[in-house]
Amino acid sequence: MAPERGEEDVRKKAENPLSGAEKGSSARDYLAEIPSPSFRLWAGLCVILSVFIIFAFYSIHQIQWLEDFQINVVQRNFKASVELLRLENDANSLGITLRDMTRPKTEYPLRYWQPVLGRLHEDMANAVGLEGRYAVETRATSSQIKELQGEVAGFWRTADRAFAAIDRSSIASARNLIQTTLETQDAVITGTVASLIRLNEQAQVDAARQIRGVYGNFERNNLLLLGVLLLLAVATGLYTLQANRTTFERLRHLAGTLQAQSEELRKLSWKLIDVQEATLRQVAHDLHDEFGQILTAVGILLSRAGQKTASKEDIQYVKDIVEETLQNVRDRSQMFRPAILDDFGLNKTLEWFVEQFSRQTGIQVHIEGQVEDAPMPAEEAVHIYRIVQEALSNVARHSGAEQAVVRLKGERGELSVEICDEGRGFAPESERNQAVGEGFGLLGMRERARRLDGTLSIRSAPGKGTVVSARVPVRQLQQT
């Protein structure tokens, strides 16, 4: 029943070769090699959003600037133009009024014109004040407005002197003052107002030119920003395409690798079944031939002893068979599972195996270095022993070498095991096919190293020997 359960367990492993912690560890190791494009994609998205935000702030700023400029310049120019036209109209009205006042034959006395001039005075004062508020602040405009304010104030002071002369009945003096001074001042006011109108028109032309420039810059910057956004979108799309292609290629490679490993492990599992059957056949053959022989000899000897016909030679013959069989049993039990590994550790086991190997094959094997005395469970140490055993077996079968070296070295938390020979070597590129198709020896060594979370590499070339190197984390061995 025990062999049947063993076969069933092996078949289950063959159906699901990557199971449990080993499957998760292997998958995580391979997936860790695939770089995630998420960070760069998020970075590209953030860059695009940042450009959009900058574009929005820029657009809002330009629109607000245009609104402020329109309010502060265009509308003020328009209001200033209205006030200047109002002043121009008042100045023309003053000129007509002054002309009517100085006619030789007027229908109204000069005193009656005072309310008319008073209304014009009030209207001009209001217009001058509003013009000072709405006019664009430039050096020329400010100077002209100050002159206008002074000229208007001087005009009305002269008008007050003229009406004071009228109150004193100095009509001739008042007429002379109106003709010689007031009309001249009115002409000066009209000229200043005309100059301000020209400055205001120039300011409107400059404002229109500036607005066109702002619109031109805004349109150009919009096109530039749209171009940048387009380039970023294209770059992000190309990167996404390339990243997805790279990811899918690596995933395809990962799937191929896992499939190849699954196939290798499945074949290895079936090979283990074959090895198990061969082992059982060998054990059955040994039990039948050797133990059957010794038991038959013992039975015959006992029969003769009962008849008192057994000789000393017969007893010695049976004794030799028993001793030889006992030695064979010990040797084969050590090959199946060396008890020395459980009792004395890896160093003594390797020394014993190398001695047995050299005696059986005639190949001189030397051990350099040793495993540190740190505690190492036999369940883990047996894998290192099997790697050395399989590597030396390959030396005996394939290399044709007369000497081999086993190097043991512990450094940087790792145990390094190297098996070197100077035999005929082989082409490394055929290593995988040999491992799968011939003896599964290389694949078995690699799986044992992987079981210890280590690595196994093979360096070889035709005619230059072979180096089998295994590296295993010592910390993992100590914690297991």
Image (cartoon, rainbow, N blue to C red):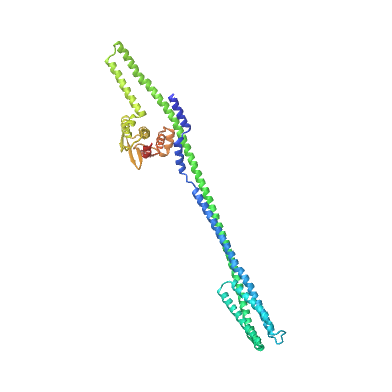
Quadrant showing the C terminus: top left
Q: Is residue 124 left or right of residue 306?
A: right
Q: Nearer the viewer, residue 23 or 106?
A: 106
Image: 30 above or below 397: below
Q: Nearer the viewer, residue 429 or 109?
A: 109
Q: Position of residue 315 (x, y in %)?
A: 29, 16
Image: 165 above or below 213: below
Q: Is residue 122 left or right of residue 297?
A: right
Q: Residue furthest left?
A: 312
Q: Is residue 9 left or right of residue 139?
A: left
Q: Position of residue 377 (x, y in %)?
A: 36, 34
Q: Position of residue 338 (x, y in %)?
A: 34, 29
Q: Nearer the viewer, residue 464 or 292?
A: 292
Q: Nearer the viewer, residue 255 or 36?
A: 36
Q: Residue at x 47, y 42 (%)?
A: 31
Q: Give the quadrant of residue 431.
A: top left
